[in-house]
Amino acid sequence: MADLNELSEKLAAIRAEVLSELEKTTSSKAVYEYKKAVMDGKTGVIGSLMRQMGKIPNEQKAEFGKKANELKVWAQEKFEEIDKKFKDAEARARYESEKIDVTMPSVKHVHGNLHPVTQVTNQLIEIFSSMGFEVFEGTEIENDYYNFTALNTPADHPARDMQDTFYLSPEFLLRTQTSAGQIHVMEAKKPPIKILSPGKVFRSDDDATHSPMFTQMEGLVVDEGINLGDLKGMLDELVQKMFGEGTTTRLRPSYFPFTEPSVEVDVSCFQCGGKGCKLCKGTGWIEVLGAGVVNTKVLEGCGIDTEKYSGFAFGVGLERIAMLKYGYNNIKLLFESDLRVLDQIDD
Ligand code: PHE
């Protein structure tokens, strides 16, 4: 039989051992592991105490039970206390390491953006698609027929001088206008036709507002009863979407061999609202594109019945639109690939 005194000493020794072991712990995890070991019902020095009950004389059982229980409660509290101490310190350390200084400048995320001319192209395609236009991309090398003759500009026609052409051979050339695509579409498709044709065009022309290669977008509508009023209505809707509400257009007489009548289209200055500023050179208007009612000779050449059908066409220079919209004063800025310039436009 174990004697109660002996057991009391044992309990005191356990208490001292727990204290000294806890001294050595350095984290809440270590406390948890130690607690698990000590409190284990089979193997733990405290957890298995009640198993000793059998060895205690009956009259001392109650006393032993009380003492053992006291030790258990004490140990539980001790574990909790130390655990809290470590948890607090650990939380503080984590807050410290994860602390965000909201006054620090943020990390700059570098991302690329589309070329301003591509942005303008995409914007126009989106607007025209919403009006039901389909995109047709022609080829950059054309023959003389599609680029000129079929567009009512036969050889020796004075209008050929309007565009300085790069000839590749007597027959082939770099297209000077996306209008060449009109003919391909009308040869391949029956009216109603509603197409948009963006692409590079080439002319021997080079100054602050002209480049030997630039981008045009052609529009062609052929259907029953199409007239200049339809063109004007569509253009007004277009410029409001492109340059903002309140923007309007005006048509001025012009000349293109493939349209009759032909017009030059001005847009009311979207910078000054028409009062007159540097951008519109004080006139309140900015020239943006050429257009007109498709010449019946062109339709007939493509086998379209002009008794029944008529159409309008327009051609717009996209570098020019990008320059106006984003304030470039020299077309070369769009071709020099200087990212400091190009990166500024993310429209
Ligand atoms: N192709 C003409 C140009 O390049 C623009 C235009 C297109 C005019 C369609 C009228 C109709 O100048």
Image (spheres, grey):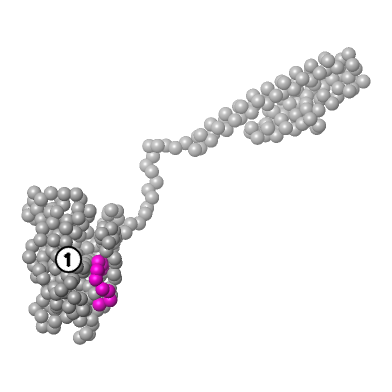
Which range of residues does the magenta coloring cover?
187-198
Q: Position of residue 344 (x, y in %)?
A: 27, 53
Query: Where 166 sits versus 24, above or below?
Result: below
**Residue 189 drawn in magenta:** yes
Residue appearing at x 17%, y 66% in the figure: 225
Most foreground residue, 298 or 85? 298
For label 1, the residue is: 226
Would you call the spot at circle 1 few (<14 residues within 10 Å), some (14-19), or many (20 or more)?
some
Q: Is residue 248 visible?
A: yes
Query: Where 150 sits versus 104, above or below?
Result: below
Q: Quadrant of the N terminus?
A: top right
Q: Quadrant of residue 79?
A: top right
Q: Quadrant of residue 316?
A: bottom left
The mark total stands at 1
Most foreground residue, 191 or 101? 191
Judged left or right of residue 104, residue 36 is right
Most foreground residue, 156 or 319? 156
Kindly give the residue lying farthest to the bottom in the view shown. 170
Q: Kindly identify the amino acid type of the residue bearing the numbered disc 1.
A: Ile
Q: Is residue 290 visible?
A: no
Kindly give the residue lying farthest to the right in the view shown. 1
Judged left or right of residue 10, residue 139 is left
Q: Position of residue 171 (x, y in %)?
A: 21, 85
**Residue 93 drawn in magenta:** no
Query: Where 213 sits versus 344, above or below?
Result: below
Residue appearing at x 51%, y 34% in the figure: 95
Q: Position of residue 57 (x, y in %)?
A: 90, 17
Decide if ligand 1 comes within 8 Å of the CB at mark 1.
no
Q: Position of residue 180 (x, y in %)?
A: 22, 75
Q: Secondary structure at mark 1?
A: loop
Residue appearing at x 65%, y 35% in the figure: 29
